[in-house]
Image (cartoon, helix red, strand yellow):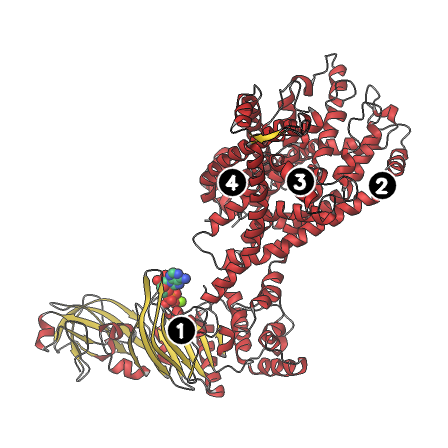
């Protein structure tokens, strides 16, 4: 509903919008700036917006001190794996709920969402024990499963709201045309829902990438992703601000870049049925 | 639209999701329930046995308990209010035809891509730190004493950090909803002589109801379990000032190593979550896709 | 082949019996139109035949084979939906090819059939476009193309023209009729528009509240409606109904006379009335005439008739054109 403004109002609005946006972004920006400072200038008083002697050293040191590529790879596998597996399970479920609804469909959806309300901490010990027992502890498979189940309700919900906008007649046409249920989903529903599926995929990759409870609780070293990597840099006590900032930047950069490049696709399906 | 065979297929196709989620919910829940009636201390593994409701009684009588409940609700409520109100304002602002909208949006959504431990440590160290933080430097610049954010105002500080993390999400959903509002509706209202405020109150806000509902529902789900931000910043302190229910359970399990009591706390947290869930679904469920 | 037989077919949604009990025979090669007011169960009946819904009771036979429990794909029928239901992500070519692909035909064969259908339907220049880039009429043709390539036993149409504008509707009506002439395949066509029914059908099935009111050729229904409902539904403008003492004179509870079967005179006739609103179309003139004791009658006169509002006129029903109905609304033959 963007509309024309008078030039003066437009200028003021532009200034206000930029001010607000920069304010929101500032912590990330400050982290970036700090990551290129020397440790001394990172804690200088008064603070230096741009350090005279900026450096890459923090990055090289963090890289040398830790096995970043392994953490990174674990993050990639876990977030993408859990999301793809979640989609594979959720697409049929959302098909059912959207196109063959029953009186209980909404209750079922709400129940699914309510499983997410159980605080993770509350069931930490049992899950830890179960994962140890069945050999999923500190494995990528284990985390893929855990994060898939954590995000499954959100995936189902997003797909459901998206599928509901697709006319059932088109699926019936496919059925008349001799498509089996599998073909109906593969050749008709899924391609039609690409924007919604893309958005669901992106959101859930982000949520999985940023998950920092199970990924830390259920791993030690082998399967630990970037959330664990950053946790190992905790409590820097003053002198390590620049390195902490560099490590933080390395932990969030991949997803930040992905998010920025795909923000259009991300936003398009992010309606949760709130947009008619 | 369906025949018996499609209905059967439909049931088979939701089944995996339902069964998996049910197992994911019931197995840990059953185990937690079991532990909650047991004496189970990692520091004295030889002593075991049934203790009835003792773990619950201890938990409910713990001096921190009501504070933890209050803190949990304050965290959820505070973050919801801040993100919905500011999210609406920011969405309205960047929806205007201003220069560089694309870049603006990129800046505004950035916090959403920052994982909680990073967000917490940026705020704790680079901003709120009493000596080296940017806020302290600003205070000194004005000749004032630095504010001890995490030491003296732990809950508001944690709420602010979490709100910053979730503001982009709220803004994005509200912005998407806002963009689906036809400018004709606004123009019609303008023709009818509605002021900017009444246009917001009577046209824009009702249009955003469903989006706000979605924001509240999703954020509540995530906020009820907030843990990492507190762990990184205040560790529930000072004292118990910023201990939430999840954090209190965590302290029992990891610090006191009393699994029985932690499990009792877990069950209490699940009950609280369910109360909130029922309240939310009743209140908001009908607002979503009618 | 395409003979379809419904025996005691019923459909209930929960407690609501949308279709209580229907028996119907559709012969091979017939153009059958289901017509009736909105919500009377036409689409439901068509979807039962298609297999998109199960019957609650009864059997459906296609070419003598019991198809009641067959899935839609196995019935050998093709359907054209009101919304066209084209696949928006596929080109016209892929849309038309889809049923053939599902049937597992080899690509060369598919190509040949799609090109053939495109030629028949004047779509050859649009094969690489997406449905979103086509006009309403073209989309309609794609939907038909998708149906004909399958060489089905019968075509099912659910109000296929209702999304088109008036001029296009007339054209498509003719095209579909011509298609039927060429293919000679059974067609079942659902509409709420009695003009479509009258112009296209070999056989009309008039439905009301899930029941068949009458089955017959268009002219049979026009000449000998079985009851008040059919009499009122078929023909435009609607048949005039007269109750009370005038009907009693004819030993009926109700008598009916079509507007085109009333002669108009300014000097003499059976009923004396006053002209109200009139519509002058040039080819015809429609008048509303209030007759004392009978109420308002619609009269159709051909050509231009110069009457003014308030004029007194005389109306005379033509010989043998009066319809008689009993108290239950059934026609007294
Ligand atoms: N899936 C359904 N569930 C419940 N009632 C239905 C369903 N489909 C149709 N109906 C009801 O059946 C009646 C007939 O519908 P329909 O066959 O679509 O009518 P028509 O096509 O003649 O307009 C309507 O009253 C409609 O509300
Ligand atoms: Mg219909």
Residue B128: where, in percent of width, then height?
72, 22
Residue B17: where, in percent of width, then height?
57, 53
Q: Mark 1 vs mark 4: same chain?
A: no
Q: Mark 1 vs mark 2: same chain?
A: no
Chain letter belonging to callout 3: A
Please say if B62 is above or below C29: above
> Which residue lies under the disc numbered 2?
A67
Label 1, label 4: how far apart the Cα atoms are: 42 Å
Label 2, label 4: how far apart the Cα atoms are: 43 Å
* In this rendering, the label closer to the viewer, 1 or 3: 3
> Which residue lies under the disc numbered 1?
C190
Q: Nearer the viewer, residue C180 or C49?
A: C49
Secondary structure of the residue carrying numbered label 4: helix
* In this rendering, the label closer to the viewer, 4 or 3: 3
Residue C132: where, in percent of width, then height?
58, 65
Could you say which quadrant of the image residue B86 lies in? Answer: top right
The residue at the point 83 percent across, 41 percent down is A68
Q: Residues within 10 Å of mark 1 (few under 14, many from 20)?
A: many
Q: Mark 1 vs mark 3: same chain?
A: no
* In this rendering, the label closer to the viewer, 2 or 4: 2
Disc on res. C101: none
The residue at the point 64 percent across, 38 percent down is B168
Label 1, label 3: how far apart the Cα atoms are: 63 Å
> Assess mark 1: CB under 8 A from ligand 2?
yes
Label 1, label 2: how far apart the Cα atoms are: 69 Å
Q: Mark 2 vs mark 3: same chain?
A: yes
Label 2, label 3: how far apart the Cα atoms are: 27 Å
> Which residue lies under the disc numbered 4?
B213
Chain letter belonging to callout 2: A
Disc on res. A129: 3
Using the rendered image of the protein, determine whether residue A102 is visible from the camera's viewpoint.
Answer: yes
């Amino acid at each position: 509903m963007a509309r024309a403004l008078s030039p003066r109002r437009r200028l003021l609005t532009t200034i206000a919008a930029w001010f607000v946006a920069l304010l929101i972004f500032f912590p990330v920006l400050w982290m970036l700036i700090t990551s290129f400072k020397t440790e001394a200038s990172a804690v200088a008083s008064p603070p230096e917006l741009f350090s005279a002697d900026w450096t890459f050293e923090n990055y090289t040191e963090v890289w040398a001190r830790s096995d970043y590529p392994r953490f990174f790879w674990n993050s990639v596998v876990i977030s993408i794996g859990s999301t793809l597996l979640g989609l594979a399970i959720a697409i049929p479920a959302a098909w059912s709920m959207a196109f063959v609804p029953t009186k209980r469909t909404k209750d079922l959806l709400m129940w699914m969402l309510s499983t997410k309300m159980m605080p993770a901490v509350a069931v930490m010990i049992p899950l830890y024990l179960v994962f140890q027992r069945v050999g999923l502890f500190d494995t990528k498979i284990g985390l893929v499963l855990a994060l898939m189940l954590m995000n499954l309700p959100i995936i189902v919900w997003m797909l459901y709201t998206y599928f509901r906008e697709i006319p059932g007649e088109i699926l019936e046409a496919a059925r008349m045309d001799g498509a089996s249920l599998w073909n109906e989903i593969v050749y008709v529903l899924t391609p039609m829902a690409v924007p919604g599926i893309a958005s669901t995929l992106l959101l859930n990759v982000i949520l999985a990438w940023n998950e920092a409870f199970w990924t830390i609780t259920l791993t030690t070293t082998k399967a630990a992703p970037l959330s664990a990597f950053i946790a190992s840099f905790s409590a820097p006590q003053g002198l390590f601000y620049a390195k902490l900032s560099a490590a933080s930047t390395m932990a969030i950069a991949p997803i930040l870049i992905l998010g920025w490049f795909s923000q259009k696709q991300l936003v398009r399906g992010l309606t949760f049925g709130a947009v008619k | 639209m369906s025949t018996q065979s499609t209905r059967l297929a439909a049931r088979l196709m939701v089944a995996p999701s339902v069964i998996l989620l049910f197992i994911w919910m019931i197995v840990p829940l059953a185990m937690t329930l079991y532990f909650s009636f047991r004496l189970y201390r990692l520091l004295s593994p030889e002593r075991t046995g049934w203790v009835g409701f003792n773990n619950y009684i201890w938990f409910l009588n713990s001096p921190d308990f009501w504070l933890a409940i209050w803190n949990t609700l304050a965290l959820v409520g505070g973050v919801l209010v801040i993100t919905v109100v500011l999210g609406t304002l920011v969405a309205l602002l960047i929806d205007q035809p201003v220069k560089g909208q694309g870049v603006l949006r990129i800046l505004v959504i950035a916090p959403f891509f920052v994982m909680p431990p990073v967000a917490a440590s940026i705020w704790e160290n680079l901003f709120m730190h009493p000596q080296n933080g940017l806020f302290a430097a600003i205070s000194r610049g004005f000749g004032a004493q630095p504010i001890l954010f995490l030491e003296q105002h732990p809950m508001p500080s944690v709420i602010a950090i979490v709100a910053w993390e979730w503001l982009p999400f709220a803004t994005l959903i509200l912005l998407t909803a806002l963009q689906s509002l036809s400018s004709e509706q606004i123009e019609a209202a303008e023709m009818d002589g509605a002021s900017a405020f009444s246009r917001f109150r009577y046209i824009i806000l009702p249009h955003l109801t469903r989006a706000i509902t979605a924001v509240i529902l999703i954020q509540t789900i995530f906020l009820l379990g907030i843990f990492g931000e507190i762990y990184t910043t205040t560790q529930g302190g000072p004292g118990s000032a910023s201990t939430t229910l999840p954090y209190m359970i965590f302290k029992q399990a990891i610090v006191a190593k009393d699994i029985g009591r932690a499990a009792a706390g877990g069950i209490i947290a699940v009950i609280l979550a369910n109360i909130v869930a029922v309240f939310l679904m009743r209140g908001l469920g009908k607002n979503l896709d009618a | 082949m395409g003979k379809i037989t419904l025996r005691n077919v019923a459909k209930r949604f929960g407690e609501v019996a949308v279709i209580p009990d229907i028996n119907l025979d559709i012969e091979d090669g017939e153009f059958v139109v289901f017509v009736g007011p909105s919500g009377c169960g036409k689409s439901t009946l068509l979807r039962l035949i298609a297999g998109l819904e199960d019957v609650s009771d009864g059997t459906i036979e296609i070419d003598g084979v019991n198809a009641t429990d067959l899935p839609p794909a196995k019935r050998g029928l093709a359907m054209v939906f009101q919304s066209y239901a084209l696949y928006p992500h596929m080109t016209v070519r892929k849309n038309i090819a889809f049923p053939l692909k599902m049937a597992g035909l080899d690509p060369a064969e598919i190509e040949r059939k799609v090109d053939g259908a495109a030629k028949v339907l004047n779509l050859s220049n649009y094969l690489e476009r997406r449905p979103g880039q086509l006009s309403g009429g073209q989309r309609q043709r794609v939907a038909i193309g998708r149906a004909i390539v399958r060489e089905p036993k019968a075509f099912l149409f659910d109000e296929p023209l209702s999304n088109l504008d008036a001029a296009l509707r007339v054209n498509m009506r003719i095209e579909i009729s011509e298609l039927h002439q060429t293919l000679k395949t059974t067609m079942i066509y659902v509409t709420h528009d009695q003009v479509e029914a009258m112009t296209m059908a070999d056989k009309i099935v008039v439905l009301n509240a899930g029941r068949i009111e009458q089955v017959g050729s268009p002219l049979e229904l026009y000449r000998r409606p079985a009851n008040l409902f059919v009499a009122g539904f078929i023909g435009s403008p609607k048949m005039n109904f007269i109750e009370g003492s005038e009907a009693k004179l004819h030993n009926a509870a109700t008598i009916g006379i079509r507007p085109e079967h009333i002669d108009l005179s300014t000097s003499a006739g059976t009923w004396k009335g006053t002209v109200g609103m009139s519509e002058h179309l040039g080819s015809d003139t429609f008048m509303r005439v209030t007759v004392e004791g009978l109420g308002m009658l619609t009269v159709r006169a051909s050509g231009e008739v110069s009457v003014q509002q308030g004029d007194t006129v005389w109306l005379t029903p033509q010989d043998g054109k009066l319809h008689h109905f009993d108290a239950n609304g059934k026609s007294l033959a």
